[in-house]
Amino acid sequence: MFRIGCHLSTAKGFLAMGRTAESIGANTFQFFTRNPRGGAAKDIDPRDVADFLEFCDRKGIGRILAHAPYTLNPCSDKPRVREFARETLADDLLRMAHVPGNAYNMHPGSHVGQGAKEGMRLIAEVLNEVMSKDMETTLLLETMAGKGSEIGGKFEEIIEIIDMLDHKDNAGVCLDTCHVHDAGYDVVNDLDGVLDEFDSVVGLGRLKAIHLNDSMNPVGAAKDRHARIGEGRIGLKPICAVINNPRLRDLPFYLETPNELPGYAKEIETLKGCRS
Ligand code: FE
Ligand code: FE
Ligand code: ZN
């Protein structure tokens, strides 16, 4: 089954997001657990969750993906910032327990000059405090473009963090096509080579979701500016190759392109059209 959706920016409750997803032809979606800049999350309404689960069942919507606020930095050099990341992640995972069996994606963090080694150690330290053996949410680390002191621009860094986790069975990876492209992985000319590399470094079994984005910048630019599908340096054909690749096609795909809902609806239609 082709699982395709997009990032929904307004979180007016789960049922509202499910309805919005359906209205644009999506059968999954990504959402922020709270304001992307951090801050308090709205209380979970058990009635809304129950209605949502029933709606998903009826409409075939599933494998939703939560996204952590991108201001979290579990490998900051400031203990207060790391503590805020820990508290937010812990609270988000509690909230995700209301919709078990889905995934929660986060940016690993930026080591802000302490070095990648120390950064990865600090990230694993925070994750080991918030993850548990019995959690029913898969925590995903997103592949990053590697801008500034960002960790996760190399597949090696992703697996190094996962290898330090106590409950690594509950961890996975979300591959962002714009990010890996910007990090220097040539998904345009050598998608299979990139996947071979991912497989040998991380293991394709760890790959749980794809962020489907075009990129405004050339391969290796370490920039992270998303473009609409077919309007960037990756292009429509290589993106269609991603959604049809035998090693990727059963994963859920989430668009994070610069679009409002009608633009997303159009992209979803285009991608359904090139799905083989
Ligand atoms: Fe992200
Ligand atoms: Fe992304
Ligand atoms: Zn990005």
Image: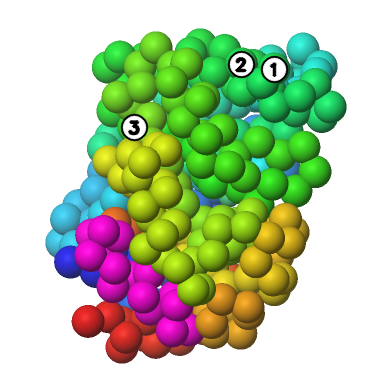
Residue 139 left/right relative to 181: left
Which residue is label 1 attached to? 118
In magenta, the rendered stretch is: 236-250
Q: Is residue 216 visible?
A: yes
Element under label 3?
loop
The residue drawn where x is 56% and y is 76% is 234
Element under label 1?
helix
Q: Eyeballing the image, is 122 above or below 5?
A: above
Q: Eyeballing the image, is 151 above or below 272?
A: above
Q: Is residue 23 visible?
A: no
Image x and y of residue 3, in percent: 28, 64
- C-alpha separation, residue under disc 3 versus residue under disc 2: 22 Å
Checking the image for residue 121, the label placed there is: 2
Q: Quadrant of residue 273?
A: bottom left
Pick the quarter of the image with the N terminus.
bottom left
Q: Which amino acid does label 1 sit on?
A: Glu
Q: Does the magenta stretch include residue 63?
A: no
Image x and y of residue 267, in percent: 46, 82
Which residue is label 3 attached to? 137
| Lower sequence index among marks 3 and 2 | 2
Q: Are marks 2 and 1 in contact (CB under 8 Å)?
A: yes
Q: Which amino acid does label 2 sit on?
A: Arg
Q: Are marks 3 and 2 in contact (CB under 8 Å)?
A: no
Q: Which amino acid does label 3 sit on?
A: Thr
| Lower sequence index among marks 1 and 3 | 1
- C-alpha separation, residue under disc 1 versus residue under disc 3: 26 Å
The residue drawn where x is 73% and y is 62% is 221
Image x and y of residue 185, in percent: 55, 58
Element under label 2?
helix
Q: Is residue 242 magenta?
A: yes
